[in-house]
Amino acid sequence: MMDYVQVLVIMLPNIALSVWLVSLLAHVHSVDVALPPKCTKSFSRGSAHKWTNWAGNWFADPEQIFCPRSLNDLITIVNHAATQKKKIRTTGASHSWSSACVVNNDGFLVATGGLNKIFDPFKIKTGGGGSDGPWAVEVQSGVVLKDLDTFLQRHDPPLTMPSNVGTIFATYGGILSMGCHGASLSTRTISDLVIEMKLVDAKGTLRTFSKEKDPAEFAAAVVNLGLLGIIYSYTIRVDPMFKLLMVDSYPLASEYFGDPSIGGPKLRDIVLGNYMTSVIYRPFSGDRLDYSDDRLWLKRWNRTDRALSHSLVPQCLQTSLQDGLGSFSTCLGQHMAAHPSSTRPVLHVVHTIMGTSSESVLRAPNAIHFTGGSETLVHLDMGFSFKTDRDFANVVQASKYAIDLMYEYAHQGVFPLNIALNLRFVKSSAMIMSHVYDEDPEAIYCMIELLSFKGTPGFDEFSTTVAQYWMKNFGAR
Ligand SMILES: Cc1cc2nc3c(=O)[nH]c(=O)nc-3n(C[C@H](O)[C@H](O)[C@H](O)COP(=O)(O)OP(=O)(O)OC[C@H]3O[C@@H](n4cnc5c(N)ncnc54)[C@H](O)[C@@H]3O)c2cc1C
């Protein structure tokens, strides 16, 4: 009898240990079982790879793609990646042209499309504890720009983002973590509108970064290139709805890009004199093999109280027409890629048809996202930013270098630039990792881009040469 008791006493701790181990294993197992459901959506866009970006210039084969729908899902994915020793990369709408979302079989890709909740807008409390400050709204990171536009327009009172990027299909996670920008001098980058960010860090902990509570930490965290954790949500400052008068004109490019001491100050006056400005150089819009006849598409936006312009074409039809125009342009782009010598005549005709000056009054989101058809117009874009000098002479020099080089190529039968050289301007960002970060809040940065249809022969070599010149001469980044 005594022996049995002794055996039991010896075995009891072992039994307890076994029970604990079994329950621990069951717990680990249940964590696996609780992983977010596999994505039903495909990210391959017709390619042989598991994921490709919108433009189709980057591919990846992550071990697993997760589609979280809640904060708990995010925490579970991070914990799972930690136990499996896997990297994590995140993708929103995959509209970036860089390799930022790429992860292969050593990691997981987290697609945030299911994190699409928009919370009720509220007024920011002022110092005295009142609630009469500016409006703000919290959005989960997978919210797509067009959905927030619609939501804010329907709010009572109607609200709007004061500035934004051109496309309506990107997500807030994508544009804010990368420090994206619009064309407005008064709102800086879009990331500068953020007042709070919630992120799941590598330990699976939810962290909140607040502009008010810790401005230094906040400035280091918001523009993070997707490398600080998975962003759950942002709180963004928004404005009461306003209208914009959008004026389009088509001056000769030589009026601005001739002598930098004349063209620079002219450009500066336009940029300083308008709420938003976009200067779009249209390659081969003239009918000579030099730039003297080429035109700019000069877009200016200003806040207005004038009545909205009435269009005889309903909005849904306008969207379809723009999409159709985008597809048609992509088809023209493919034709020019296959037959480069057709580039000049094709672009000359297109720009002659589309070069009529006009003005219209639109609600802010419609005016800001004027390039409706760009989603179906599949193109590549190389963008840089540099600080403008006092008279904008470096803006003229940077533009003119690219245009002159483009014509050098053209003389050899190569037409590497066939959509635009685009200039937009914003004041510096307070976000430390931003490409336009500057300690001087009044510094003006020029965002300069080269855009060509995907597959355009010579674009990679041409844009690389131009990028090197911009980096070396103007400190572009
Ligand atoms: C037609 C078109 C027009 C454009 N116009 C402009 C413009 O006017 N101005 C401008 O600045 N840019 C513009 N862009 C670029 C575009 O805004 C950026 O590339 C933006 O990052 C795309 O957002 P996305 O949701 O597609 O991000 P993705 O390409 O999916 O992701 C980009 C990066 O964001 C990170 N990320 C996304 N979500 C999260 C998250 N939840 N947590 C952590 N990291 C995250 C990813 O890790 C990745 O590094 C344009 C792009 C296109 C295709």
Image: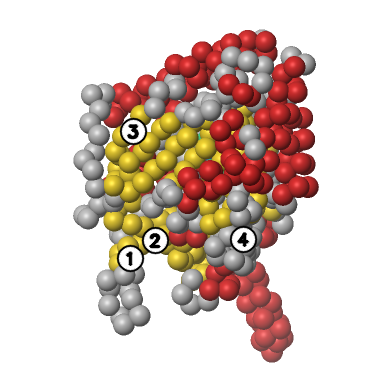
Mark 4: amino acid: Tyr
The answer as to whether callout 3 falls within 8 Å of ligand 1 is no
Residue at 42% over, 62% down: 235
| Residue type, label 3 | Glu
Q: Determine whether 412 is above or below 316 in the image.
A: above
Structure colour scheme: secondary structure
In this rendering, which labeled residue sits more in front, label 1 or label 3?
3
Say the numbered circle drawn on residue 326.
none
Whether label 1 touches label 2, CB < 8 Å: yes
Residue 134 is marked as 1
Q: Which mark sits nearer the N-terminus, 1 or 3?
A: 1
The disc, 4 or 3, on the residue closer to the chain's N-terminal end is 3
> Which label's residue is closer to the chain start, 2 or 3?
2
Q: Which of 151 and 81 is in front in this view?
A: 151
Per the rendering, the mark at residue 437 is 4
Residue furthest out toward the bottom: 2
Q: Residue at x 25, y 34 (%)?
A: 309
| Label 1 or label 2, whichever comes before in sequence order | 1
Distance, label 1 to label 4, CA atoms, is 24 Å
Relative vertical location of residue 43 with respect to residue 475 in this rendering, above or below: above
Looking at mark 2, is its residue's CB closer than 8 Å to ligand 1? no
If the picture is divided into quarters, which one holds ligand 1? top right
Residue 148, position as x, y percentages in the image: 36, 48
